[in-house]
Image (cartoon, rainbow, N blue to C red):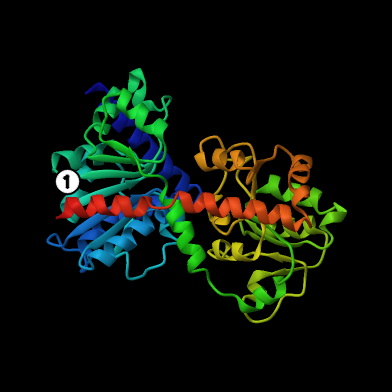
Amino acid sequence: MGQNVFYNALISLYSAAVKTAGFTGNQKAKQRYAGQKSALSALHRSKQLKKDKNTVWFHCASMGEYEQGRPIMELLKKESPEIFILVTYFSPSGFNHHKPDDIVDFYTYLPDDTPQNAVAFLQAVNPRLAVFIKYEFWKNYIDELHRSQIPLIYTSAIFRPSQPFFTFYGKSLLHSLKTVDYFFVQNRESVEVLNAHGINQAEVAGDVRFDRAVQTVKNAKKYPRLASAFLNSQVIIFGSAWLKEIEALEFLIKNPAMDNIKLIVAPHDISKNKINRIKQAVKRDYELFSDIQNQRTPKAKTLIVDTIGDLKHLYQFAQLAVIGGGFNEGIHNIIEPAAFGMPVFFGPKNKKFPEAADMQTLNTGFEFNNSAHLEEQITPFLNRETKLQEAMMRQKQYIQSRTGAAEKITDYISSKLE
């Protein structure tokens, strides 16, 4: 009981902090607070959502987790078109970038994880089954799902001995975890950690991001004018680049071996000052993607991506990828560029990403610690077609070997809905 009170107090404090941040000018906090407060009323007003529908609820922290759940949603809709798919988000970056389509029937924010909100939300939605993706742990929702006898499964989850559930102060959290119907995890270590704490309803299914990435390759958006511009050229793409990666680009571009290399640079933040920083870094002719789109063929050697949503499709034009985040919160998605066969280069904060370790073992993924180190790692691939093609073949084989998680998870969900 004491740990429950402490947990709920933390949730209240966090909610108050978000509210305060919103009032003091933080736009993300303001959007999230407003979205969470209006979520329940939006559900009640919805003419689409009816309690008698065959609803499956997916909860995602943000857009990255949504992308992991998307292949499962598509397979479910294909098998049973009558299923009503509800998606909730924690972050504005997920909610704001969600594009309505015929797969997701309704999407909204998840109200704060209080006992009252959990009861009200489940009464409004009445799902047949809930799917939480990766790291989303909300104790009151999990407990209320259990009390309501609504199955809950986790997908693409990763567990480590150091997580709060497995500490002396996390007994209440562990108790809630034990009520989850099934865990589909990414690696064997996660199964072993769960088993060691009395949770046996778990298996390795892999990471659905591999399935999603392969789908993206097959359905990549066509850019005919870009295709002609990059034809017969070696191209390096900097994806979701933060300041450290831009600094590394600024250093790398001085290398004479880069003279004939074309660049695509997509920053993590497309604000004006970040785009201007890239312009300073490249020190060569450039064009903005927003000015080109498919209207004309770019002539400059550098294309700066100043739009949202195009990066995963633009990977098709490159042969080498430098991915951002490895000097900040953790590397961004390296599976997306790897699915196109590219060797990938990333910063040191990659230890929580099993795919980074796999690719380093295969010599298709390379960690760099500073600008000079990136140059050292990437130079052997510049203008060396045979070495590059060998690495690209290994990368494609690795990605293909890791697909299949979405189908396995969908089969389990379908069996629970019968």
Report the residue that reaches farthest toward the top: 168
Where in the figure is residue 398, as x and y percent of width and height? Answer: 53, 49
Q: Residue at x 59, y 38 (%)?
A: 361
Query: In which quadrant of the rendered view does residue 187 lie?
Result: top left
Residue 321 visible somewhere in the drawing: no
Residue holding disc 1: 150
Task: Please tell me which residue lies in front, 66 or 108.
Answer: 66
**Residue 116 higher or lower than 414, as above or below:** above
Where in the figure is residue 129, as x and y percent of width and height? Answer: 21, 50
State the quadrant of the N terminus.
top left
Task: Please tell me which residue lies in front, 409 or 37.
Answer: 409
Q: Secondary structure at mark 1?
A: loop
Where in the figure is residue 11, as x and y percent of width and height? Answer: 34, 36
Task: Please tell me which residue lies in front, 47 or 235.
Answer: 235
Q: Say what amino acid the circle numbered 1 marks.
A: Ile
Residue 157 visible somewhere in the drawing: yes
Q: Residue at x 20, y 64 (%)?
A: 49
Where in the figure is residue 192, as x and y percent of width and height? Answer: 36, 28
**Residue 367 placement, left or right of 42:** right
